[in-house]
Amino acid sequence: MENVEYIIVGDGYAALFFAHRLIRDKKSFVLFSEGRKSASQVSAGIINPVVLKKFTTFWKAQEQIDFLKESIKEIEEYTGENYLIDAPVHRIFHDENEQQLWHKKSQKDELADFLDENFDHLDTVKNDFHTGKVNQSARLKVNAFFAGLFSFLDNRKQIVREKFGYSELDTQNSVYRNYQFKNIIFCEGIGVKENPFFSDIPLQPNKGHNIKVKLSIPVPENITFKKKHFLFPVQNGLYFYGGTYDRDQLHNDVDASAVEQLKKGLAEFYPHGFEIEEVNFGFRPTVKDRRPILGRHSEYQNLYVFNGLGARGILNGCYFSKSLYDFIEHDIPLHEEVSLERFL
C-alpha cells in the first residue's frame, strides 16, 4: 500500500495547476489521467483580461494575470521551459463605433491597464477600422505545457494513465486500490457527470470547435488576431483559428455548421486563400454564473471538486487552485462566489 497525501483525478488545467501547488509545497500525490484529450488540451491557450465583445474586464482579472505569471515562472524551474508566448491580442474593429467605444473605455480606471489607447493598422489582414491591442494579454504553449508537465510527472512516477474507477473507492478507509490517501481532488471537466459523488453540480457543457489552417500568405507571428475568433500560428506552418460556442449541439462529432462558421469568420478579415488541415472540438465545463466550482463533499470530508473553469481555464485553473489548496491545508474559507456551497 502506497501512502499519498493527494489523489488528483483529471488531466486538464484544473488538475495540472493543482498538481503544481502540491509540487511546490512538496506534497505527495498521484494523478489519474484517462488519456483522452480534454477541452483544456485542445484549447487556444489565450490569456486575456478583457471580454472582447463588450470591452469590459472580469472579476479579479489583474490578480489572476499576476498570479499566472508567477506560477509559470515556478513551473519553469522544474520543467526547464517557459510556456508563455508574448503575442498580445489585437482586436480587429468591426466599425468606427467599436473603435470609439474602445477608446472611451480605455480611459476608465479598471480598463486603463488593459486597453491600449493607441490603434494599429496591420498588414495582410483586413482591418479598415484598425485594431486595439490588449495589454498584458498573451498565449500559453498548450501542447508544450501539457507535454512538459506530464513528462515531469511520468519521471517521478506520479501519473497513472487509466480511468478512475469510482466503485473501487473505499471512502470509509480512504483507500483506492493500492493507495492510502488523505484527500482526493476531482478535476474532471464534463466527465464529472459520471462521478457519483459530484454528478449533481450544475455544469453546462459548451462545445467549442477550432480549425488548423494553412494560409496562402503568412500573417505576423508576434500577434494574436481577434475578430469573431482568434487566429495565431502553431506548429508545422499551420495557424489555429477558433473557437466556437455551442450549448445545443452536444453530440460527440464534428458539426459541419461550426466549421462553416469558422470558415466565414476567418474569410471576413483574411482576404486570401486558406486550406483547413485539421478540425478539433472539446466540451468546456461552464457554470451559469460564470464562476468556477470548488468545494468539499457534504458527506465525505476528504473528497473535493475543482471544476467549471469555462473559457478562462488557464486563469481560473491557476488562480483558484491556490484557493482550494489553502482551503484544504490551512482552513482558509473559499470565496462564496466560487464555493460549491452556493448551490446547496
Image (spheres, rainbow, N blue to C red):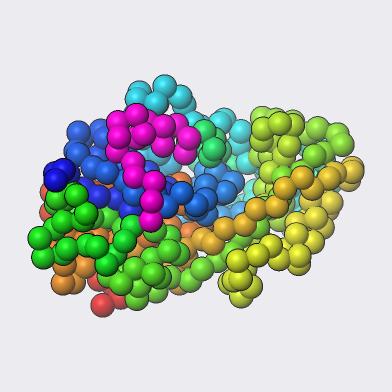
Residue at 83 percent of width and 45 percent of height = 275
Which image quadrant for residue 98? bottom right
Which image quadrant for residue 263? bottom right
Relative to 162, 236 lies left or right:
right
Inspect the magenta stretch and tell me whether residue 73 lies in it: no
Residue at 82 percent of width and 38 percent of height = 215
Residue at 46 percent of width and 49 percent of height = 35
Residue at 35 percent of width and 23 percent of height = 77
Residue nearest the observer in this picture, 114 or 30? 30
Residue 132 in sight here: yes
Relative to 101, 157 lies left or right:
left
- Quadrant showing the C terminus: bottom left
Residue nearest the observer in this picture, 310 or 226? 310
**Vertical relation: 255 (above or below) 31:** below
Question: In the rendering, at what x and y percent does residue 185 appear?
Answer: 27, 55
Inspect the magenta stretch and tell me whether residue 157 lies in it: yes
Magenta segment boundaries in residue numbering: 146-163
- Quadrant showing the N terminus: top left
